[in-house]
Amino acid sequence: MNQIPKINSRDNQKLKFARAVRAGQERAWIFVEGIRLTAEVLKTSLTIRQVVVTSHLLQNQRSVELIEKLLTANAEIAEVEEKIFDSLSDTKTSQGIIVIAEKPKTGRELVEKNLSQNPFLLLLHQLNNPSNLGAILRTAEAVGIEGVITTKGTTDVFSAKTLRGAMGANLRLQFWTEAEFSEVLRWAKERNIRSVCADIRSDRSYLEIDWKLPHLLIIGSEGHGLSESERHQSDESLIIPMQNGVESLNAAVAAGVIFFEAKRQRDGHG
């Protein structure tokens, strides 16, 4: 393996840039941390701007093979001391590798381009917990969601925490971000896609929805859900019936329950 240059200063420009990406100040790039996510980035066509590693990482054969692939992809790699790396890392127990890569493209046209004749889409409205968002995205990919739309006020689908929570699903799903809620529902209606929102005031179970039809599932904020006006803009509403006085579920758990019922029906089992 080629000799990897070392960085010994916390004030190095490359490290400053990586910190800015981690903080969301460099919007054109994403902060990817860990061996598995680095491998997922390598499967894409995204440009890799720089890679930071520790000497500890270079002692592992699997990691060395990963570094070789990064070098083949012409990635610029630098080694830093453990203390410097810890100041850069976004995790408590890092694996010793950080990649700064190009942010995937997003936009309404990307979602439109990938629509099937019977689409199943997801609208996330003002979710602010990146771990919840990541878990939802990972499950959305597992059930074949064709496109994910997020409104203004929703946390960044490509933040470091969301990327970890989604285990790289963010790199494969099609996104339309920073959308206006009303605009999305009008767009769906024009395409005969029924919008359905999760609402604890609904009297209709998620099991009663005909998921075989084209649908846009709406998941609202963890804290306050949807406003009355937003609920009325939806074609349908649903509730997940619960026992023992439980009123609501974590947003990611609720999304998963609904996703897999929809998948069951769409696969012809209901």
Image (cartoon, rainbow, N blue to C red):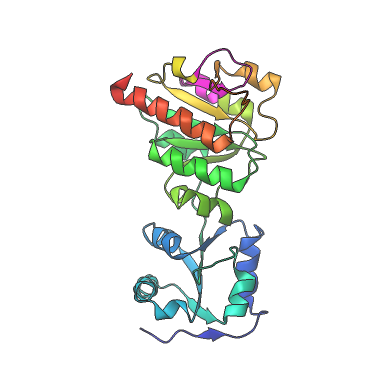
Quadrant for residue 197, please give it: top right
Magenta stretch encompasses residue 36: no
Q: Nearer the viewer, residue 262 or 240?
A: 240
Q: Is residue 226 above or below residue 63?
A: above
- The residue sitting at the left extreme is 268
Report the number of discs. 0
Q: Position of residue 52 (x, y in %)?
A: 52, 74
Q: Could you tell me which residue is drawn at 57 percent across and 28 percent down? A: 184
Q: Nearer the viewer, residue 245 or 131?
A: 245
- The residue sitting at the front extreme is 244
Q: Position of residue 173 (x, y in %)?
A: 44, 44
Q: Is residue 156 visible?
A: no
Q: Does residue 269 appear left or right of residue 32 in this picture?
A: left
Q: Does residue 205 appear left or right of residue 42 in this picture?
A: right
Q: Nearer the viewer, residue 235 or 54?
A: 54
- Image quarter where the N terminus lies is bottom left
Q: Is residue 196 above or below residue 124?
A: above
Quadrant for residue 85, please give it: bottom right
Q: Position of residue 120 (x, y in %)?
A: 42, 28
Q: Nearer the viewer, residue 247 or 122?
A: 247
Residue range highlighted in magenta: 186-205
Q: Is residue 130 above or below residue 253?
A: below
